[in-house]
Amino acid sequence: MSQEIIDIVQNYLTPNIPITLVSQGAEAVVFTTHVHPYLPQDSNKTGETKYIIKYRPHKKYRHPVIDQQLTKKRTLGESRLLAKLYQIDGLKVPKLIACDQYNGCIWLEFLGSQLPDNNGFSNLKHFLWWNKADPYNNVVKESLLKVGQQIGILHWNDYVHGDLTSSNIVMVQDKLGVNVWNPHLIDFGLGGVSNMVEDKGVDLYVLERAIISTHSAFSDQYVEWIMQGFSQVYEQHGATGEKKLKELLKRFHEV
Ligand code: AMP
């Protein structure tokens, strides 16, 4: 990780907002902080609440003007999409807190859970590893049904994710149940509006590949549960839902 990028972000945020690096991808660098972008500092007295800062670094190989336009477009695009998705009934995505499209930063609600081996962060991939000694237990089944339901709600509303891997599904522990998990979808940098069965089929295919590649021994059952949850959402919408589901499943099997 280049210290240069951390310095750029820290410099822009000023030393009053301490940041901790979480991950660096090709498109974005992600940090956590305990400081809210516009509420007074003492609104987080216990220091327990964390926020995510997602920063899109400048690309030196791009012309600076094009680079700035692209950064602005993608930062705004992801923010707008998240804000719309957050309003969809039943869909779980992080809440957008702030967007600074000129500096390429968005602030999000931090989604965290305590898994013993993973610094408090748990995506679907870790969650399935964590359960590998008892891979078909009821908690796994219920959680994967919910994963499918989340994708079903997203697709039913004509949105697609664009990079639906098991790392982009965060498992959040329910406040009322120690072993009840609520999957949330993150990273909508490649997401958008689409009513095309092809785009939705690709989302499902990408997730299936991700599960096969990391949990191959159990993947058939896992994918079946996800598809079961997915189908439930469409089936709730009567004949129209059933028809759309049929087209989608056909497409999914073709991909
Ligand atoms: P992204 O570039 O959006 O895929 O984020 C990269 C990584 O940052 C993810 O794989 C997570 O580890 C972490 N992350 C991103 N958004 C959140 C969030 N809202 N809550 C918790 N962790 C997140």
Image (cartoon, rainbow, N blue to C red):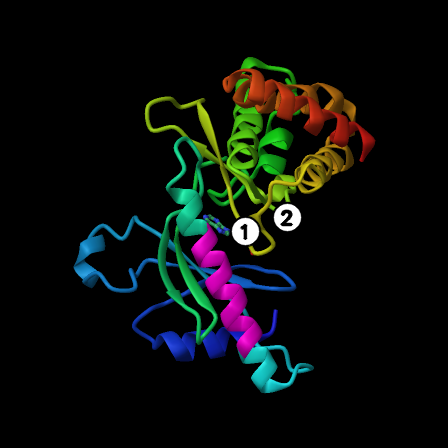
- The question of residue 80 being in magenta is answered with yes
User: Does the beta carbon at disc 2 come under 8 Å from ligand 1?
Assistant: no
Q: Position of residue 107 (x, y in %)?
A: 39, 59
The residue that mark 1 highlights is: 188
Q: Nearer the viewer, residue 31 or 88?
A: 88
Q: Could you classify mark 1 by the number of other residues whose Cα lies within 10 Å: few (under 14), some (14-19), or many (20 or more)?
A: many
Q: Position of residue 230 (x, y in %)?
A: 59, 24
Vertically, is 205 above or below 40?
above
Q: Could you classify mark 2 by the number of other residues whose Cα lies within 10 Å: few (under 14), some (14-19), or many (20 or more)?
A: some
At 64% from the left edge and 21% from the top edge, which residue is drawn? 243
Q: Which residues are magenta?
A: 69-81
Q: Nearer the viewer, residue 187 or 241?
A: 241
Q: Quadrant of the C terminus?
A: top right
The residue that mark 2 highlights is: 162
User: Does the beta carbon at disc 1 come under 8 Å from ligand 1?
Assistant: yes
At 49% from the left edge and 45% from the top edge, which residue is drawn? 119
Q: Main secondary structure of the magenta part?
A: helix
Q: Position of residue 65 (x, y in %)?
A: 57, 85
Q: Position of residue 158 (x, y in %)?
A: 55, 39
Q: Quadrant of the N terminus?
A: bottom right
- The question of residue 157 being in magenta is answered with no
Please name the amino acid that badge 2 sits on: Gly
- Between the residue at mark 2 and the residue at mark 1, the CA separation in whole angstroms equals 7 Å
Please name the amino acid that badge 1 sits on: Phe
Question: Who comes first in sequence, dot 2 or dot 1?
Answer: 2
Q: Please identify the residue farthest to the bottom as the structure is shown.
A: 64
